[in-house]
Amino acid sequence: MQYRKNLPLIDYPTFLAKVKELENFTSARGSRYEVDGIVEEILFFRRMDAGGTEWDLDLKKTYKAYLELETFETKDFRSYVARRHSPARGLLLALELIA
């Protein structure tokens, strides 16, 4: 499935405010994540389908990926967020920034 931007023009403060409203989100393949909080520009969350494994995601880099990418395959996130490709895309889906 090809993902494209829904809302191409969004500034970082608006992006961050939308993230702060989330309590949970799901990856495109159905992995469930529960948000624990944000410290500075890092989102802390747990992968519920893997025993509550704790993960983190750099929001500034995820936002940069959103601005710069034209397609949103998980491999496209490699140069932005190391080993967090699927959660990054899932976050953008949950924020309705891509569809």
Image: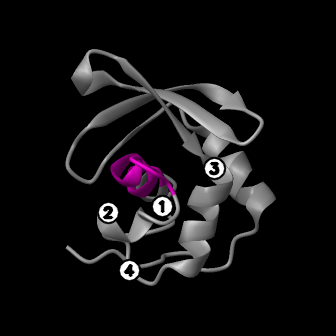
- Relative horizontal placement of residue 3, taking residue 36 as reference (left or right): left
Q: Position of residue 57 (x, y in %)?
A: 54, 42
Residue 96 bears which disc, if any?
A: 1
Point out the image quarter for the N terminus: bottom left
Q: Tell me, yes or no, whether the highlighted magenta stretch contains residue 90.
A: yes
Number of marks in picture:
4
Residue type, mark 1 in image: Glu
Q: Main secondary structure of the magenta part?
A: helix
The residue positioned 73% from the left and 47% from the top of the image is: 17
Q: Where is residue 25 in the image (x, y as percent from the top left)?
A: 41, 40
Q: Position of residue 89 (x, y in %)?
A: 40, 57
The residue positioned 41% from the left and 47% from the top of the image is: 84
Point out the image quarter for the C terminus: bottom left
Task: Tell me the distance, in whole angstroms, between the alpha carbons under discs 1 and 2.
Answer: 17 Å
In the rendered image, which residue does mark 4 sit on? 71
Q: Tell me, yes or no, whether the highlighted magenta stretch contains residue 97.
A: no
Q: Which of marks 4 and 3 is nearer the N terminus?
A: 3
Position of residue 79 relative to residue 13, above or below, is below
Position of residue 19 relative to residue 72, above or below, is above
Q: Which of marks 1 and 2 is nearer the N terminus?
A: 2
Residue type, mark 3 in image: Leu
Q: Which region is colored magenta?
A: 81-91
Q: Which of marks 1 and 4 is nearer the N terminus?
A: 4
Dot 4 falls on a residue whose secondary structure is: loop
Task: Tell me the distance, in whole angstroms, between the alpha carbons under discs 2 and 4.
Answer: 9 Å
In the rendered image, which residue does mark 2 sit on? 74
Dot 2 falls on a residue whose secondary structure is: helix
Comparing marks 1 and 4, which lies closer to the viewer?
4
In the rendered image, which residue does mark 3 sit on? 59
Dot 3 falls on a residue whose secondary structure is: helix
